[in-house]
Image (spheres, rainbow, N blue to C red):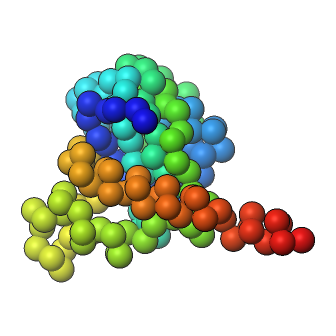
């Protein structure tokens, strides 16, 4: 299993998560204001995706390149226009279907990272585009995703039953 140096959480809208998934998790862009953090990303670092709005965790990936700058429009920005120019190449490790994704309302309160916030405000820990997570939190999320992925999606099970 890949050993990361830094564990990142990318907070993404469902639409942008789907765009990254449709690109087969080969590239991830970070917002303009995340330049300093994005430039710290290194090959071997690990990424977990938190999907805002639906409050779910959907995938993990491994960073395979240093950060580069590219302004080609790929992702959609909400509010102030942003072309997510700070980009790294990635390789997917675990990706769940939308209906399989982990409910952050169930797993979030168990994360070490959210303990800096009062219990009733733990979702505030996920505001913003890019966060560094403790290794234990990343491993908890990825382990839970692997358990769900091993069971297969409901659509895969339905297809297999036919």
For the C terminus, the image quarter is: bottom right
In terms of image quadrants, where is residue 117? Answer: bottom left
* Residue at screen point 42% across, 61% down: 144
| Residue reaching furthest to the bottom | 120
> What is the x, y in percent for residue 18?
59, 52
In the picture as drawn, the residue positioned furthest to the right comes out as: 162
Tag count: 0
- Taking 115 as reference, is 148 left or right? right
Looking at the image, residue 71 sits to the left or right of residue 131; the answer is: right
**With respect to residue 116, does 69 lie above or below?**
above
In-image side of 102 versus 131 (left or right):
right
Q: Position of residue 74 (x, y in %)?
A: 57, 37
Q: Residue at x 19, y 57 (%)?
A: 113
Q: Residue at x 29, y 68 (%)?
A: 108
Quadrant in the picture for the N terminus: top left
Would residue 78 be seen by someone viewing this image from the given angle? no
| 156 shown above or below 138 | below
Image x and y of residue 126, in percent = 28, 59
Identified at 52% across, 48% down, the residue is 94
Compared with 79, 67 (above or below) is: above
Q: Position of residue 110 (x, y in %)?
A: 24, 69
Residue 119 can be seen in this image: yes
Residue closest to the eye, 156 or 29: 156
């Amino acid at each position: 299993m890949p050993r990361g140096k830094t564990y990142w959480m990318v907070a993404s809208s469902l639409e942008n998560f789907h765009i990254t998934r449709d690109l087969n998790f080969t590239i991830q862009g970070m917002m303009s204001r995340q330049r300093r953090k994005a430039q710290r990303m290194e090959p071997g670092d690990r990424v977990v995706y938190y999907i805002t709005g639906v409050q779910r965790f959907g995938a993990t990936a491994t960073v395979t390149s240093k950060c580069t700058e590219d302004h080609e429009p790929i992702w959609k920005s909400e509010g102030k226009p942003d072309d997510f120019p700070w980009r790294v190449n990635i390789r997917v490790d675990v990706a769940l279907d939308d209906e399989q994704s982990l409910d952050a309302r169930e797993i979030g309160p168990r994360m070490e990272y959210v303990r800096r916030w009062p219990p009733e405000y733990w979702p505030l820990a996920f505001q913003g585009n890019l966060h560094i997570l403790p290794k234990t939190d990343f491993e908890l999320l990825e382990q839970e995703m692997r358990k769900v992925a091993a069971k297969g999606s409901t659509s895969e099970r339905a297809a297999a039953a036919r």
